[in-house]
Amino acid sequence: MTAIDDPLGLAPDAPLFAAWLRMSIDVRNGHTRFFSIPGHKQRPGLTGPIVHGDLPLYAGLDTLGGLDALRRAEARAARLWGVDWCRFSVGGSTHANQAAALAIGAPGDTVIVSRTLHRSMLSGLILAGLRPVWVYPDLDPRHGLPLGVPAAAVRAALAANPGAKAVLVGDPSYVGTTGDVAWLAAAAHAAGVPLIVDGAWAAHFGFHPDYPRHALALGADALVLSAHKTLPAMGQAALLLARTTRDGGLLDPSRLERGFESGHTTSPSGAILASTDAARAVLAGHGTRLLGDLLRLRAVATEKLRAVAGLEILTGDHVDRPSSSSGCPAPARSGPGSISACAQPVSPSRWPTATLWCRC
Ligand SMILES: Cc1ncc(COP(=O)(O)O)c(C=O)c1O
């Protein structure tokens, strides 16, 4: 193996990525010939180099039955985010959201849902037969952008629907604004139900003190992350993380497993899964440094963009930091990946990208 194969030396901390490296080097050197799927058998004769590295999980990076390397890789991710359950998806946050929906209730059950949730969660509600009770985010008065769903709205919806099974929100929102996840978790837990957060754009949150803490550290029970959006993972890579009843949480691990498997391919790409493992190792070993670099670049870009006529950089509550009035009811427990400790009131945290709004 060369430095080109593993420039950051991730393999010792990344079992599935290490398996992918071993096998792809064997294939490259002609030591392994495939008799299993994919049908290209890593041979570029017909379709060219697009086949390189496309190794299967089953009977490839891992065994057909044991899934040893995959399970060890997922366990490392669960530890990093401070929970007891994690699965890697090759179906994006779309699949992970739908898996979460399938795990939380039976057809006909009510759930409290942010009206701005991504369509993947909305289709998850349809697949699971759940009945949404909508809650709406506050709107930024100047720009009309959706901010966070207020905890008071969630409390009121839970009080009006005592049989509700869960609260589902997206944070950060699709437009990059954030809500008060800790208060939403407190509201859900006061009613004895889990808070599920679609954090598709926030796989890097919680790994630098100047970024927001991640939703699990703020008390959420399940978190959906697109590793392919903000981490160096391959397209379609995503994670579903949860605190389950095994660890004093509210979610049933066997329902999560069944919800996850029912929509996941039975022929997952080993390469995508291995890239999730590698991206997790990057975050664990180098995340703080890399995110610090990103913040410095962001500051430079922000200054340059401020000078562009007609562009405004949004700052302040729900953009650069959670609402100033919010305080932080988040539990003291947090995963090993959570850097910032809970503070009263919440310490300001910068956003990963400049949110722009055109005044024209
Ligand atoms: C908030 C949100 N949730 C879920 C998804 C679905 O993610 P994926 O493309 O990884 O399936 C997206 C996609 O953009 C998204 O923006």
Image (spheres, rainbow, N blue to C red):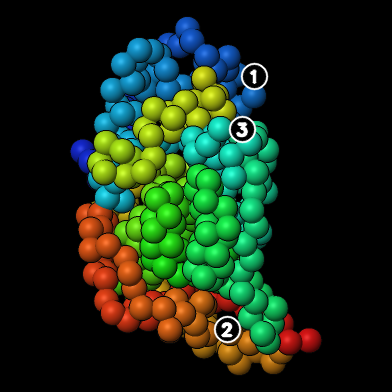
Give, as a three-letter code, the residue at label 1. Leu
Looking at the rendered structure, the number of numbered marks drawn on it comes to 3
**Which of the numbered marks, if any, corresponds to residue 107?**
3
Instruction: Give the secondary structure at mark 2.
Output: loop
Q: Earlier in the sequence, mark 2 or mark 1?
A: 1
Q: Nearer the viewer, residue 1 or 151?
A: 151
The answer to whether the residue bearing label 1 lies less than 8 angstroms from the nearest atom of ligand 1 is no
Residue 281 vs residue 52: left or right? left
The answer to whether the residue bearing label 2 lies less than 8 angstroms from the nearest atom of ligand 1 is no
Give, as a three-letter code, the residue at label 2. Leu
* Residue at the image point whose x is 46% and y is 22% from the top: 56
Q: Earlier in the sequence, mark 2 or mark 3?
A: 3
Q: Residue 322 location, x and y as percent?
A: 44, 76
Q: Relative to residue 227, is residue 48 depicted above or below?
A: above
Q: Which residue is mark 2?
A: 314
Quarter in which the C terminus is drawn: bottom right
Q: Relative to residue 26, is residue 230 depicted above or below?
A: below
Single out the residue that lies furthest toward the top. Answer: 35
Q: Which residue is mark 1?
A: 46
| Crowd class of label 3 (few under 14; some 14 to 19; many from 20; radius 10 Å) | few
